[in-house]
Image (tube, rainbow, N blue to C red):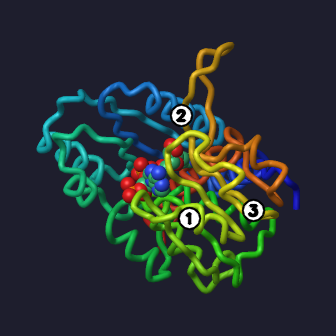
Amino acid sequence: MKKRLSGKKIAKNIYASIKEDIELNNISLKLVILLIGNDPAAEYYVQNLEKKGLKIGIEIKTIILDISIDQRLLLEKIDALNNDNKVNAIMLQKPLPNHLDESEIIMKINPNKDVDAFHPLNMGNLVLDKQGFLPATPAAVLELIKYYEIETNGKHIVIVGRSDIVGKPLANLLLRKSETGNATVTVCHSRTKDLSFHTKQADILIAAIGKPLFIKSDMIKDNTIIIDVGVNQIKDVEKGYRYVGDVDYEACFEKVSSITPVPGGIGTITTAMLLNNVLFAYKIQNKN
Ligand SMILES: NC(=O)c1ccc[n+]([C@@H]2O[C@H](COP(=O)([O-])OP(=O)(O)OC[C@H]3O[C@@H](n4cnc5c(N)ncnc54)[C@H](OP(=O)(O)O)[C@@H]3O)[C@@H](O)[C@H]2O)c1
């Protein structure tokens, strides 16, 4: 296994496979993104998705909604997209403004178009090991594990972060009786006492915290494998800003067996897996 676990080749393979499937079966795929307000990071992510979609043959339409949109109007918009047969997939760009009831909005999205896998039905399928959408970031972690043949069977995997989109689904996937599962999983969070005690036990450490360079070399054991999910913007003297992970990559590099970079690691694969979910949506909608 390489020391630097790049996600670029993995993402490239996923895009090639989606494109091939679209061309071979001569299908049209459409993803609609609901973007509320004008958060620059969200806009950047969406623009990047649009570019990738265009390259592989997925139509992506972004609907920009006013930050003050009311709940009822947003639910009506989702209803219209649910009923539009040309729309295979709906993506709700988070975070949502505080006045909106996120849970009600997620429940409104047709589970068969829910490429983020936020709907409780999709989350339930994931936990019960039934076929369904996998959220893109946890799915990206599994793709990385597969590609680099990282052994998870019987290993102790420590995840720092328990969010609904990363930590929780990932913990469940790594517990599965599967090629990329069978791990003993510990999930840590902001109330965990003596975090370093736990992170030092990890054969594989997964960071999904949202705090730049938070995991330092004295928090890990020798020869651990680190998968850094974090993406944080920090100030940079030359460029103005740059992106770093939740792990202090430079400080940990010597000590680890291998580590994912940021950027160029999990985030790169995540975008590809999100578009792969659009293809999956088409397949479940056209099963018969
Ligand atoms: N690469 C990708 O494609 C991708 C996708 C999604 C997210 N991300 C990145 O991944 C990171 C996490 O995202 P998220 O959406 O999961 O974030 P989130 O919802 O804010 O969750 C962060 C988690 O970290 C925990 N945490 C915060 N401070 C901590 C501390 N001092 N010690 C231990 N745990 C702590 C929180 O604990 P509590 O639950 O107790 O608050 C929470 O469970 C962010 O950097 C985000 O940008 C990347």
Quick check: 232 above or below 120?
above
2 left or right, relative to 232: right
The CA distance from mark 3 to mark 1 is 12 Å
Mark 3 secondary-structure assignment:
strand
The CA distance from mark 1 to mark 2 is 31 Å
**Circle 2 is placed at which residue position?**
50
Say which amino acid is labelled 3: Ile
Residue name at image x 44 percent, y 78 percent: 127
Badge 1 local density, few (<14 within 10 Å), some, or many (20+)?
many
11 left or right, relative to 130: right
Say which amino acid is labelled 2: Glu
Q: Position of residue 93 (x, y in %)?
A: 38, 42
Residue name at image x 33 percent, y 63 percent: 119
The disc placed on residue 159 is 1
Q: Position of residue 247 (x, y in %)?
A: 64, 47
**For the residues bearing labels 1 and 2, Cβ distance under 8 angstroms:** no
Mark toward the viewer: 2 or 3: 3
Q: Nearer the viewer, residue 80 or 154?
A: 154
The disc placed on residue 208 is none
> Looking at the image, is mark 3 or mark 1 earlier in the sequence?
1
Q: Is residue 238 visible?
A: yes
Badge 2 local density, few (<14 within 10 Å), some, or many (20+)?
some
**Circle 3 is placed at which residue position?**
225
